[in-house]
Image (tube, rainbow, N blue to C red):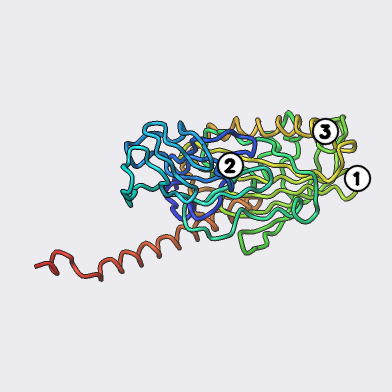
């Protein structure tokens, strides 16, 4: 399945900018352009072109809480309404079609999020380690990957690739077997807890020695169709940490990938620069293979060969399959409702 074919994905929240980014800013979601700009009360996402003569609004100015079109100076408020037209004669009303379509924007974890469909939740999925445990949060990266968002999330959940893809960081091809694990359904997706024995990960815990190996548990959770949480627990042998990852689909072949980290240790015990440098090496190994992987992602369980160790990724396909089925039923319902409406041509005659 191509990612733009699953329309219901538009009802979820996606990152569009870091809080440090400059605005106005052109962003793309699901193959369409939008403009992010800053009003007096916060950020606003809107259509990319002025309704007057189609000027690109990422070239506009932010002035006194308004977005000012660079072409003719029309001014728009945060609700999308046109507040002022310089060329309009005194006493005449602003044309009712002089408005911008806008979308909600909220801030979480140093990132701005938006929903361009009908929001199914009030914001992005909550992050236990940040919200409840108060761990140190860092934005690791928000960057373009030349691959499908489905592939990124599938890789986050996959348990059998590290032995081979991550040989230069923590993978060990002599230990390819994945311990048995179970999948526990949640309201948003599912969660699994998997015992692991890994070497090389010392820098992620403030230990500058990649020769050491550790027993740990990985908690892998699907928080949404394009959102994961990964928790690594060391049972007191070293500080724990967690990754919070979300993918913004640009189109079927490109994604903006956000990843944040939460660290249990303080900066002395678990230096972020050391942590991030090692994590970056791991991520780059994933990126190299994902950018040459087919972006057309089969969600039918029977289209690919699966093993016992693939339970996570099989369940991910089931979640997407349910979304696709729900969308199909909705489309059929909408079509039926449309067909039952009176024929306007017949009524007119």
Q: Earlier in the sequence, mark 2 or mark 3?
A: 2
| Callout 1 crowding tier (Cα within 10 Å): few <14, some 14–19, many ≥20 | few
Write down the residue under mark 1.
237
Say which residue appears at 76% left-offset and 44% top-offset. Answer: 262
- Spatial CA distance of label 2 from label 3 is 24 Å
* Quadrant of the snapshot with the C terminus: bottom left
| Callout 3 crowding tier (Cα within 10 Å): few <14, some 14–19, many ≥20 | many
Q: Position of residue 130 (x, y in %)?
A: 75, 50
Helix, strand or loop for disc 1: loop
Write down the residue under mark 3.
203
Write down the residue under mark 2.
152
On screen, residue 318 above or below 267: below
**In the drawing, does residue 209 fall left or right of residue 63?**
right
Helix, strand or loop for disc 2: helix
Say which residue appears at 71% left-offset and 37% top-offset. Answer: 163
On screen, residue 114 above or below 170: below
Q: Position of residue 184 (x, y in %)?
A: 68, 62
- Spatial CA distance of label 3 from label 1 is 14 Å
On screen, residue 172 above or below 13: above
Q: Position of residue 260 (x, y in %)?
A: 69, 42
Q: Earlier in the sequence, mark 1 or mark 2?
A: 2
């Amino acid at each position: 399945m191509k990612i733009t074919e699953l329309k219901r994905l538009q009802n979820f929240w996606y990152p569009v900018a870091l809080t440090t980014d400059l605005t106005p800013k052109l962003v793309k979601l699901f193959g369409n352009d939008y403009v992010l700009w800053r009003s007096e009360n916060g950020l606003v996402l809107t259509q990319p072109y002025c309704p007057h003569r189609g000027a690109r609004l990422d070239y506009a100015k932010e002035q006194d809480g308004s977005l000012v079109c660079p072409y003719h100076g029309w001014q728009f408020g945060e609700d999308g309404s046109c507040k002022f037209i310089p060329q309009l004669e005194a006493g005449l009303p602003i044309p009712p079609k002089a408005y911008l379509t806008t979308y909600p924007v909220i801030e979480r974890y140093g990132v701005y999020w938006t929903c361009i469909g009908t929001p199914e939740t009030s914001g992005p999925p909550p992050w236990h380690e940040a919200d409840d445990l108060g761990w140190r949060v860092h934005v690791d990266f928000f960057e373009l990957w030349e691959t499908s968002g489905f592939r990124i999330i599938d890789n986050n959940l996959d348990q059998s690739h590290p032995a081979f893809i991550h040989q230069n960081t923590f993978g060990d091809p002599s230990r390819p077997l994945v311990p048995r694990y179970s999948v526990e359904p949640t309201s948003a997706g599912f969660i699994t807890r998997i015992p692991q024995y890994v070497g090389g990960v010392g820098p992620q815990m403030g230990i500058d020695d990649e020769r050491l190996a550790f027993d740990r548990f990985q908690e892998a959770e699907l928080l949404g169709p394009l959102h994961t949480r990964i928790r690594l627990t060391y049972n007191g042998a070293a500080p724990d940490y967690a990754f919070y990852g979300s993918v913004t689909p640009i189109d079927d072949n490109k994604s903006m990938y956000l990843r944040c980290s939460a660290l249990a240790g303080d900066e002395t015990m678990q230096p972020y620069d050391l942590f991030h440098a090692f994590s970056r090496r791991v991520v780059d190994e994933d990126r190299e293979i994902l950018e040459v992987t087919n972006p057309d992602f089969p969600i039918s369980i029977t289209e690919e060969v699966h093993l016992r160790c693939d339970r996570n990724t099989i369940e991910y396909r089931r979640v997407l399959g349910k979304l696709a089925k729900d969308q199909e039923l909705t489309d059929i319902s909408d079509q039926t409702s449309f067909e039952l409406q009176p024929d306007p041509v017949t009524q007119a005659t």
